[in-house]
Image (cartoon, grey):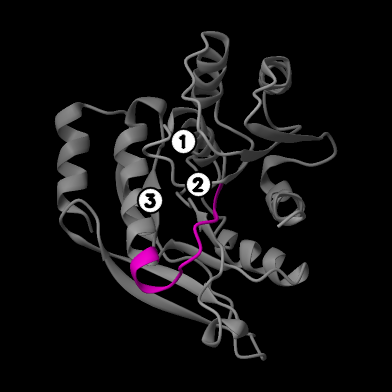
Amino acid sequence: MKARFFISLLALGMASYIKGAVVPILPTDFNDGSRIETFTFESDGPAAKAHIYLPESYGENKNLPTIYLIDFTEQHFKMARDEFAQVIAAVRKFNKEALVITLNEILDIDAEPQSFEIHFQMYRDLVSAVDAKYSTDSSRTLIGKGSESGLVMMALFTETPETSLFDNFIATDPSGHYATAILNQIENENIAYPKSNKKLHFSFTSSNDYPKCSKIIGSIEEAAFPWLEFKSEKYRDRTYENAYPHAYAEAIEVVFESE
């Protein structure tokens, strides 16, 4: 799908790997004029494809915020194919007017901190394509679960004022390696400070490392970043496999409540 992307991974000797891809579940029961389109964009040279949800109001208003879903195949939970549908459902549930974007395939990637730049570049390219064709609104949200949520948080803490793309960040159940990397960033004060205000909704479940995730929450609260509005949830009665629809919906409501 992305020849140069694959070659880069091999050349750098990354732990990440791609064995194949699956097709995400796409909602088809819209009865109000909303729709999903597939479009092509350039990603580091080769062409790639993505899906975008367009609400009914899109025909009259292209100044709508965007939500970008990072949806890779989790290595220990490969059956989840409905994340795109769940994000759209959350947007519709709370009557939010927003575009939702994801890759048209769920890539079999084991996201690790050392391959962050390679993985995140796909979403930089995706933002450029959506801005050029679909939206004139600069309000953007990045969302993901598992190892992808680590990628979301790494994006938050590494974006500089010059490279900043996203305003809102939704992360649930980070992987162990990414959780450690995020903690190290915060504790070592290795944080890029954006000029504009950011929002982060962070959550984790009983399936995750409770002490480590709690430490992330405590470290962020202690840091009290003046540019960050932070909200966290501990889903003690939910597991990684069944929490993400609830976590997505709650987080989307929170980050959009004042917009």
| Rendering quarter of residue 106 | bottom left
Within 10 Å of disc 1 (Cα), the crowding (few <14, some 14-19, many 20+) is many
Q: Nearer the viewer, residue 119 or 65?
A: 65
Instruction: Name the side, left or right, on which 209 lies relative to 189.
Output: right
Q: Nearer the viewer, mark 2 or mark 3?
A: 2
* Location of residue 228 in the rendering, given as x and y in whole percent from the top left corner: 65, 32
Residue farthest front in this picture: 195
State yes or no: discs 3 and 1 in contact (Cβ < 8 Å). yes
State yes or no: discs 2 and 1 in contact (Cβ < 8 Å). yes
Q: Nearer the viewer, mark 2 or mark 1?
A: 2
The magenta segment is: 131-143
Label 1 SS? helix
The residue beneath circle 3 is: 123
The residue beneath circle 1 is: 155
Q: Is residue 27 magenta?
A: no
Marking on residue 166: 2
Name which residue type carries label 1: Ala
State how many labels appear. 3
Label 2 SS? loop
Q: Nearer the viewer, residue 157 or 162?
A: 162
CA–CA distance between discs 2 and 1? 9 Å
Label 3 SS? helix
The numbered mark, 2 or 3, whose residue comes first in the sequence reads 3
Name which residue type carries label 3: Tyr
